[in-house]
Amino acid sequence: MKETEIIILVASFICGAVGSLLAKRAKKKSSYMLLYISTALAVLTFIGIVAAVIFVFFDK
């Protein structure tokens, strides 16, 4: 299960980085669509981090 934790954390990091870049671009362009996409990526990042923490502490 260690591979699963690493995959989840890497995917969360990628979602967070892309979401951050989209948020900066949305701020410059005043685009609500980019802002919604970056918000969705932020939620995916949060869910991924919580899932990884659950796997670390409760996986035996």
Image (cartoon, rainbow, N blue to C red):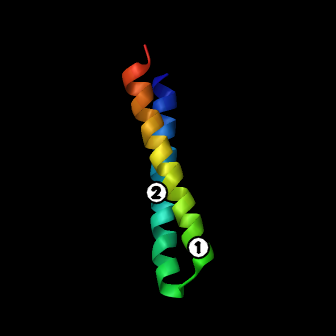
Give the amino acid type for the residue marked by disc 2 in the picture.
Gly
Which class describes the residues within 10 Å of circle 2: few (<14), some (14-19), or many (20+)?
many
Look at discs 1 and 2 and give the one toward the viewer: 1
Instruction: Say which residue appears at 48% left-offset and 50% top-offset.
Output: 45
Q: Residues within 10 Å of mark 1 (few under 14, many from 20)?
A: some
Looking at the image, residue 34 lies above or below residue 39 = below
Q: Are marks 1 and 2 in contact (CB under 8 Å)?
A: no
**Which residue lies most toward the right here?**
33
Q: Which residue is mark 2?
A: 16
Residue projecting furthest to the bottom: 29
Q: Residue furthest left?
A: 57
Q: Is residue 52 above or below residue 11?
A: above
Quick one: SS at disc 1? helix
In this picture, is 20 found above or below 49? Answer: below
Q: Residue 51, how many percent across, how many down?
A: 47, 35
The label number, if any, that marks residue 51 in the structure image: none
- Label located before the other in sequence (1 or 2): 2
Q: Residue at x 49, y 43 (%)?
A: 47
Disc 1 marks a residue whose amino acid type is Leu
Give whichever of 26, 8 is nearer the camera. Answer: 26
- At 54% from the left edge and 57% from the top edge, which residue is drawn? 41
Give coordinates of residue 39: x percent, y percent: 52, 63
* Secondary structure of the residue carrying numbered label 2: helix
Residue for badge 1 = 34
Residue 34 lies, in percent from the top left, at 58, 73
The residues tagged by marks 1 and 2 sit, at their Cα atoms, a distance apart of 14 Å
Relative image position of residue 30 (x, y in whole percent): 53, 85
Q: Quadrant of residue 57?
A: top left
